[in-house]
Image (tube, rainbow, N blue to C red):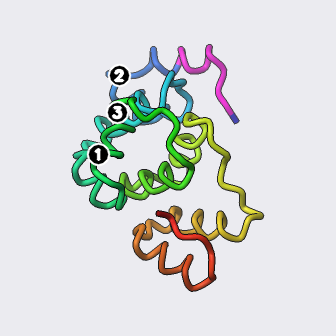
Amino acid sequence: MEKSTNELLEILKSKKNYNEFLEEEIGELCFSSLSEYLEMLVNEKKLKKSDIINKSNLDKNYAYQIFNGNKTNPSRNKVIMLAFGMGLSLAETRKLLKIASLSDLYIRSPRDSLIMYCLNNRISLIECNEYLCDFNFELLE
């Protein structure tokens, strides 16, 4: 359940520093663009974009266009691939999809539920694609 604005304000007031607030309440914050949210995640998790791109199997130029905001409407698969590359949790991935104005992962969809399982169990993109292939589902590519 989402926290009210007043609840968030009280939590912020109780924190010793902003990083502590950000780490605990990132799921409650609003972002104006996908690139803004991605940049915040990269900074918060102390990730390197080059590592994310390697782990996500995305084309380097395409991925950098998403990161810098030049590519404003990446496909759902590409955003999910970025989530794997960043090592995001299921909740973080769902928020990423929401910010990108893409459909949420749906537990009743066999393919989506397998992707959710992989995210929840910190399975790599390559291994997830192997599972998808085993079940004859569309790969994340």
Percent across and percent down for residue 96 are: 52, 41
Residue for point 41% across, 27% down: 36
Assign the magenta stretch its main secondary structure. Answer: helix
Nearer mark to the viewer, of 1 and 3: 1
Nearer mark to the viewer, of 1 and 2: 1
Q: Nearer the viewer, residue 141 or 32?
A: 141
Residues at marks 2 and 3, CA–CA distance in whole angstroms: 17 Å
Residue for point 44% across, 66% down: 122
Q: Nearer the viewer, residue 133 or 20?
A: 133
Find out whether the residues at labels 1 and 2 contact each other: C-beta distance under 8 Å: no
Q: Which residues are magenta?
A: 2-10
Residue for point 67% across, 46% down: 103
The three-letter code of the residue at mark 2 reads: Tyr
Q: What SS does tag 1 mark?
A: helix
Percent across and percent down for residue 116 are: 59, 63
Instruction: Pick whichever of labels 1 and 3 is earlier in the sequence.
Output: 3
Residue 61, labelled with which disc? 1
75 to 117, vertically: above or below: above
121 to 53, vertically: above or below: below
**The stretch drawn in magenta includes residue 110:** no
The three-letter code of the residue at mark 3 reads: Glu
Disc 1 crowd rating (10 Å Cα; few below 14, some 14-19, many 20+) is few
Q: Quadrant of the N terminus?
A: top right
Residues at marks 1 and 3, CA–CA distance in whole angstroms: 16 Å
Residue highlighted by disc 3: 39
Residue for point 57% across, 43% down: 97
Percent across and percent down for residue 85 are: 36, 56
Instruction: Pick whichever of labels 2 and 3 is earlier in the sequence.
Output: 2
Residue highlighted by disc 2: 18
The three-letter code of the residue at mark 1 reads: Asn
Instruction: Pick whichever of labels 1 and 2 is earlier in the sequence.
Output: 2
